[in-house]
Image: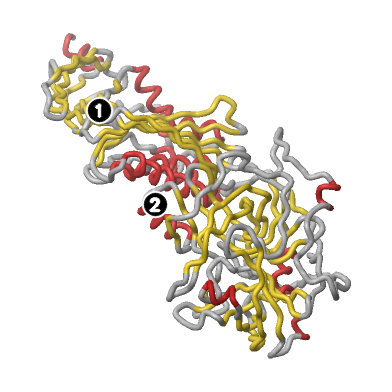
Amino acid sequence: MYKRPLSHIFFVCLILTLLVTTHVSWASQSSFKPTVPVLPLEDLKPGMKGYALTVIQGQKVVSFPVEIISIVPQLESRPRHLIMIRVSGDVIDKTGGIAAGMSGSPVYIGQKLIGAIGYGFNFSEHNIGYVTPIEDMASVWNWPEVKKSLPKFTLPLEKEDEKESHKEETQPEEDKGENEEIGTNDTTSPESPSDQMTPKALPLQISGVSQRTVNKLENVLGEKAVLAGGISSDEHIVDYKAAFSPGDGVGVLLAWGDVTVGAIGTVTSVDKDGRFLAFGHPFLERGAVAFPAAKVNIHNVIPNLASPFKIGSFSQIVGTITQDRAEAIGGQVGYFTPSIDASLRFKDVDRNVRALKRFHVVPDPFMSSEMTSILYTGLIDRLWGRIGEGTARVSLQIEGYGLPKGWTRSNMFFSESNIGGDSLREIQEIIKAITLNPYKDIYPLGIHLSVEMTQKPNLIFIEGLKVEGETFRPGDKIPVEITLRPYRGEQSKKKFELIVPQDAAGPVEIAVRGGGIMPLEEDAIIQGWKTIENFDQMLKEISALETNNEVILELNYAKVPDETSQPGPTKEDLELLSQIKERRLNEGSMRIFRTDYVVEGLLRKIVQIVPETNNRQERE
């Protein structure tokens, strides 16, 4: 049972995300120059024969014959042309045709590069597909890269002699020719080439989480996903000296570690500076990105009626994908960006079992804020071994640049059917508010979650509210007794005192409730009198949100009219939530105590407050 409505604080912070700024540098671009000669699109003719390179097992690059069928213009789409091909040979006989994961496989005619296999057809002839021309693929480098530049954070760079040691593209020795410079200035709007074609990158491969997490990520990322993949090595997850060659498998990662989210394709071409092109179609088409690029190990190619597909695992991270465009993805070997560091400390209270899971997420706040909370849910599903009712105690810690002391929040939740998902809804909104905040960049960022779960309903119910007396004066202490009952347990009573404010008068309400049930309203923000002005204030307002394990006792009253007051909002009207709570706790009109239960219930009682002036008149 998720009680708390979304706080208005989150709405304010999310509305302001249009003002998000980050420390970035716009890298200057130069035309991509493959290390092999290129055969221009206009020189291609039906019937020309050549070969393609790919990996079907391990990391060994193999070749298979290719024949051009036709050149298919795409009108205003990107890419502007596609090359229809027919593939054949022993490799294709073994795979059952063009397989998902072959996206990016370079195609050569007369030992010259023409482009990469990008598309095939499902439930059709798997030996026929489309090649994306290298001219179109190389145009991704006409777009600017956005590289994060973070204070006090350095990245390892390759030495010049290490760059020169990169392997050249695989090709026959004869007729290498001179390298041709590739680059266009196409600015047409992106469109899908055809609904009948299928990009031949693998679906998103996800490991370490539950199946329902896979389904949620499909909706969030807009891509088909399967439970597969994973990181194949626990040591040296980053290789600072690696290089790509055409035909190599390449993985694009969104999350890695104890959970993995990524896709597998093939490297098409590299240049002398370590840049590379792959896929021959977009990954998520998010433009300038910072997605880790990894080596992959292919286990096998599985023939399939819809489409053959590769099964692979991700290996060492070797660089970063910086371009994700309609024509291809492009990246840089040896360039690495910071990531979001995430961890989950989990305790199954019923079995007294503990676990620690760690993973990293790409530094894209608009994507990672939601993806991180979904991955947490998937980890919890796997660790708890069930989906259903229960109680959870959740603690969130966020640290990073701009948060030298870190920030924490704890809460409790009960759900009748989905505690793993319901307990993380608030976490998801908080992560969004912080990562998308409009005030300051906080990367590198760490998000650490601690969760204790039990199948038991750790609930406590408010069953009684007793007030001693019916009439009081400003400044009086009002004795209040609250009756509580734990789920199927014995009643207990607690006594408190509320202090009547000096400006209270007439009928006032004494209320006791669980945290999050009819919470204090943030009128200053709702009515537009005030807004949150900086990051520290935003954190303070999130910290002031009520928690579900609190018992809140409050005196709600109308103020005595002040004849000298001016039109417009009062001082209290301009208070934010944290200020309202601080004032009311200090004046004694509110009392809060925390329990080890999720608190349910709301009770009210009305008493009369007689102003001091009326008392003096009665005595006179």
Q: In the figure, residue 127 lies in which quadrant?
A: bottom right
Residue 44 or residue 90, whichever sits in front: 90
In the orientation shown, which residue stands out farthest toward the top?
619
Q: Which residue lies furthest to the right in this view?
A: 178
At 18% across and 9% down in the image, what residue appears?
Answer: 620
Residue on which disc 2 sits: 213
Per the rendering, the mark at residue 476 is none
Binning the other alpha carbons within 10 Å of mark 1 as few (below 14), some (14 to 19) or many (20 upward) gives many
The local secondary structure at tag 1 comes to loop
Residue 60 position (above or below residue 127): above
Asked whether residue 443 is in view, the answer is: no
Give the residue displayed 27% in from the left and 35% down from the top.
391
SS of the residue under disc 2? helix
Residue name at image x 16 percent, y 13 percent: 618
Q: Is tag 1's residue or tag 2's residue first in the polypeptide sequence?
A: 2
Between marks 1 and 2, how big is the CA–CA gap? 28 Å
- Say left or right for 143 vs 613: right
What kind of residue is marked 2?
Thr
Looking at numbered disc 1 in the image, what kind of residue is underneath it?
Answer: Tyr
Tell me where residue 247 sits by quadrant.
Answer: bottom right
Q: Position of residue 135 (x, y in %)?
A: 74, 74
Evaluate whether residue 18 shows in this view: yes
* Residue pointed to by mark 1: 597
Q: In which quarter of the image is the N terminus?
A: top left
* Vertical side of 369 occupied by 491: above or below: above
Residue 278, horizontal then vertical, whole percent: 66, 64
- In the displayed structure image, the side of residue 334 where residue 557 appears, left or right: left
Which residue is at the front of the view, 534 or 253? 253
